[in-house]
């Protein structure tokens, strides 16, 4: 007698949802080895576990299900896999640059606000609304600098 795992058992084993497994089945990415026609229950064999591990590993490094499907459809062709992974690396490096740039801008805004606070700490009293307007102007100036920077990058 063959050993099969029910969909709920597989979901629990791999800490994923039954719904995810249904989606993988619908995408023809990871289909059950056996389906009971009378109940509709899905059953998976132990031989399928490495495939699910591979899918989850690819997901963990940021590949989409469509990308994983493409890799599987190409029968894990090394050239296609390398190309896709290199493309993902470029994407993530670009994201790192954008995030770094955003952090630097936030730090500049923080410094500008702190400088503003220090200059006006002992100065004449101003209303909350006046302070909010000045702070928003500072933030807007920093945003304009950022927009100019992005415009330069996009036109290079």
Image (cartoon, helix red, strand yellow):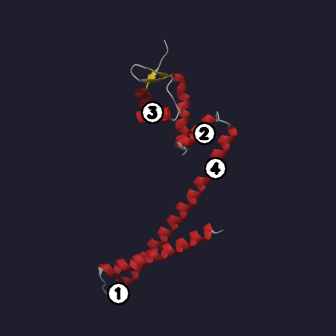
Q: Secondary structure at mark 4?
A: helix
Q: Secondary structure at mark 3?
A: helix
Q: Position of residue 140 (x, y in %)?
A: 45, 75
Which mark sits nearer the N-terminus, 2 or 1?
2
Residue 70 — which label?
Answer: 2
Q: Kindly check if marks 1 and 3 are in contact, taking CB atoms under 8 A apart as contact.
A: no
- Give the residue displayed 53% in from the left and 32% down from the top: 28
Which is more foreground, mark 4 or mark 3? Answer: 3
Alpha-carbon span between mark 1 and mark 3: 65 Å
Which mark sits nearer the N-terminus, 1 or 3?
3
Alpha-carbon span between mark 2 and mark 1: 64 Å
- Give the residue displayed 52% in from the left and 27% down from the top: 49
Q: Which residue sits furthest top?
A: 1
Q: Which residue is mark 4?
A: 87
Which mark sits nearer the N-terminus, 4 or 3?
3
Q: Position of residue 1 (x, y in %)?
A: 48, 11
Alpha-carbon span between mark 1 and mark 4: 54 Å
Q: Which residue is mark 3?
A: 22
- Give the residue displayed 40% in from the left and 28% down from the top: 8
Q: Kindly check if marks 1 and 4 are in contact, taking CB atoms under 8 A apart as contact.
A: no
Residue 123 — which label?
Answer: 1
- Give the residue displayed 48% in from the left and 77% down from the top: 141
Q: Secondary structure at mark 1?
A: loop
């Amino acid at each position: 007698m063959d050993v099969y795992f029910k969909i709920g058992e597989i979901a629990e084993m791999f800490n994923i949802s039954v719904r995810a497994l249904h989606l993988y089945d619908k995408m023809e990415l990871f289909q059950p080895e056996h389906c009971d026609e009378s109940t509709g229950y899905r059953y998976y064999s132990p031989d399928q576990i490495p495939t699910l591990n591979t899918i989850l590993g690819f997901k963990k490094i940021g590949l989409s299900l469509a990308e994983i499907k493409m890799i599987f459809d190409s029968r894990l062709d090394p050239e296609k896999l390398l190309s896709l992974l290199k493309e993902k690396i470029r994407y993530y490096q670009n994201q790192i640059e954008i995030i770094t740039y955003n952090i630097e801008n936030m730090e500049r805004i923080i410094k500008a606000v702190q400088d503003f606070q220090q200059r006006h700490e002992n100065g004449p009293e101003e209303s909350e609304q006046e302070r909010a307007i000045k702070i928003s102007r500072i933030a807007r100036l920093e945003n304009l600098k950022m927009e100019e920077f992005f415009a330069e990058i996009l036109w290079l």
